[in-house]
Image (cartoon, coloured by chain):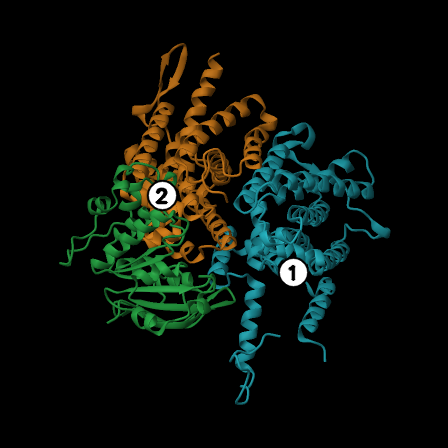
Chain colours: A cyan, B orange, C green
Amino acid sequence: MIPPRLFVLALALAALIAVPWWVPGDYYISVSSQILIYAIFALGVDVLIGYAGLVSLGHAGLFGLASYAVAAALAGGSSQFGAVVLALAVALLGTAVFAALSLRATGIGFIMITLALGQIMWGLAYRWVDVTNGDNGVGVAARPMPFGLDLEIASNFYFATLVVFLLALSGAWIFVHSPFGASLKGTRDQPRRMTALGYNVWLIRYFACLFSGLLTAVAGILFVYYTKFISPPTLVLTSSAEVVLMVISGGSGTLLGPIAGAALVVIVKNLASAYIERWNMLLGAIFVAIVVFMPEGLVPGSMRLAQWALKAIRPPLPAGGSPSGKAGAP
Amino acid sequence: MSLWGILAINSVAFGGLLFLLSAGFSLIFGLMRIPNLTHGSMFMLGGYVGASLYMTWHLPFWLAALGAAAVVAVFGGVIERLLLRRLSGSILAQVLVTLGISFIVADFCLLTWTGDPISPPTPPVLAGGVRAFGLFFSIYRMAIILVACVVAALLWTLLDKTRLGAMIRAGVDDPEMARVVGIRVSRLFTIVFCLGAGLAGFGGIMGAPILSVYPGLDTDMLPLALVVVILGGAGSLLGSLIGSFLIGLVYNFGQAMFPELAYFVLFLPMVLVLALRPQGLFGRQAS
Amino acid sequence: MSALALAGIDAFYGDSHVLHGVSFALGEARLLGLLGRNGAGKSTCMNVAMGMLRPRGGHVTLLGEDVTGKPPEDLAARGLALVPQGRRIFRSLTVSENLIVAARRIQGNGTHAPWDLATVTSMFPRLKERSRQIAGYLSGGEQQMLAIGRALMSNPRVLLMDEPSEGLAPQIVAEVMATIRRLKEQGLSIILVEQNAKLVFDIADDIVILNSGRVAVMDTKDRLVKRGLDLHQHLGIY
């Protein structure tokens, strides 16, 4: 008897793999790719928000840094592989610097510093025209062709993205369930106790930042290949805010939450915008509704609802049930 | 020399606007520990509402400004009572709600006032300028500086000389003990939030003849408010005042002298201050 | 009618069960000494009574009215005041501001004049001298006087005092105890939490001893003294 959770996840995986067949048309396949890209981005941000307890409002800066690195490298004549490697290196370096500065504070101070750093990146992208081409942005001529697979075709690009997404998700899963992940959660919940126990809280947070930066860079690289273009608006404060909202609305501190949040935002942005001109308002209203009705996020909230529904359907326990009077959670 | 003079005046005037924007944010954050990420939207909303009152309904400018402040204050009160009140202590929920509301406000403004920037003309009584010491002083900008100083004085009087102000400061010191002593802290929160929102809205319309009102004004102004509050320390009026003028100077001179690195020049001091002295130059509490 | 009563209080800090079915009552115009070792739950009782901690079970009754779960400001409005452990005066306010923010005017109830800035500062002349000084710079003893004066400014009928002698020089402690005696004579109902049992026994009418979050001993002081109660057993080092 397969546990229900595993069954649902297997179903979801099958659905993801089968997307090009059940999704109607190339446009929607592209949107699916976009959801996966932002899901990776959101996972990266969730590592910090949900597991380290640090809210960053500047991650779009790192995201954009990776994108610009790819575009610049390609424009400079590098190979696709070289561009990707360079972008990862540059973004990790940037993360190392950002994290060193940001971790001087926690809580609101961390939010403010990351916001400032994100704004600095945006400002540089916008104003340092010699390097970034300013408002005009930088284009990417062609997507890579790994193993001869032409990624210009929407479904091929989707599969490539899916592979990367699954790798990223696995990486995040391993990270979160590792002893390091446990110590990270410890620094989130009880930083003083962790210090008293001899853990180097700063270093733990620093490594978490690096891992977060890695996932963000991966998303940024996929993004620039997806749009084949990078320009300053990608790094604007609203973009950092959006990914944070993806994480919180989906459910921070979970792995599925960021994915749900990314899907929510991308779907509203791309699909609802066909019907509703002011989709930003709709998105904002959805966020407010989530805070009111499901403050822990969509995924934990839905699971809570599902458990409640299951309990309501299940026949009552015979007399002399559990001593505490509450049904135990699985 | 006169270019530096003009820059200096513009900086001080901009600092005055920043003060109107950030004093409210500082109070709200100092007392309620809420990072009000809707604050930039309130500035923008005040600009739009005030511009409409002034240009479409032909109210005198000062009445339009007060009206805009009142509208935004009420809006702030509604948000606080209906939404923020239930979220105390949960920083993630506060971030989600305030950002969500800023999205709604931004789109609402886009819907109501369309995407074209709105530039209310300087009110005739304050138009033009005066020549002195070989410099040209724009009267409106002088008026802004004066208004900001008057508001600062009024706020200082409120906080330092009234019982309400003492209650607010007690709430900043020790919110739990304030309630034990009988202070209706939740009512105080609503008052402070309305006050902060109203100030931001007032700043928006006061700044409109200079900055215009346009989509994106909210995300332009919010980071500046944060920088001022970081530098000056949350909950400190003096810190907001000094921080505002400092940032006004850095922003304008930075834009003029290093246009490519404008944001760098602006945010680097903030990052440095946060790195070295997390409670800001004048702030009190540690985190 | 009791001035303040806890009935069957179960209180938790997070998942930690701190008070188990605690029940006791403070009689009107009486002084109840609440004793116990460190960590027995005395301050937790005070926090529950003052509405700072919501109990998961049980009731709090103030002057005959069930106030369980009501916030502290509501209790202050109904005549309950707290002198908390550690004083917790408003550090950045001046002495007189500390008093003014707590002021609650009531009609004179006949027994004595209502507390206001003038009467409080005349009871504590040192506070009057320092009325414009920032409270954070006062000495420990002066802060204690300020904390008591601040509690009086709300004209309470029930006063909770949590370790007022903590960290004070013996001479100051004597002053504090004399003040408490005066307040008792004026008809205030008082709960006094103290580690120093001797201080409490001198002044209390009733005694409650807590042990690990449960009421171990509850009786009038006179009857306890007659019983020859062995305090060592309940309070450890004496």
Q: Please, which residue is most extreme toward the bottom here? A: A319
Frontmost residue, A313 versus B179:
B179
Q: Quadrant of residue C49?
A: bottom left
Label 2 SS: helix
**Foreground mark, 1 or 2?**
2
Instruction: Give the residue at x 67% y 51%.
Output: A199
Kindly identify which residue carries mark 2: B169
- The answer to whether the residue labelled 1 contacts the one labelled 2, judged by CB atoms less than 8 Å apart, is no
- Three-letter code for the amino acid on which mark 1 is drawn: Leu
Residue A167 seen in the figure: yes
Frontmost residue, C72 versus B49:
C72
Kindly identify which residue carries mark 1: A255
Q: Quadrant of residue C125?
A: top left
Q: Please, which residue is most extreme toward the left here? A: C110
Q: Is residue A299 left or right of residue C132?
A: right
Q: Position of residue A160 (x, y in %)?
A: 77, 55
* Subunit under mark 2: B
Residue C71 seen in the figure: no
Sort mark 2 into few (<14), some (14-19) or many (20+) by Cα contacts within 10 Å.
many
Q: Position of residue B136 (x, y in %)?
A: 40, 15
Instruction: Give the residue at x 41% y 13%.
Output: B135
Q: Position of residue B34 (x, y in %)?
A: 45, 48
Counting every numbered tag in the picture gives 2
Marks 1 and 2, Cα distance to the nearest angstrom? Answer: 42 Å
Instruction: Give the residue at x 38% y 17%.
Output: B137
Q: Is residue C188 left or right of residue C163?
A: left
- Three-letter code for the amino acid on which mark 2 is drawn: Arg
Pointers 1 and 2 within a single chain: no
Q: Is residue C115 left or right of residue B160?
A: left
Label 1 SS: loop
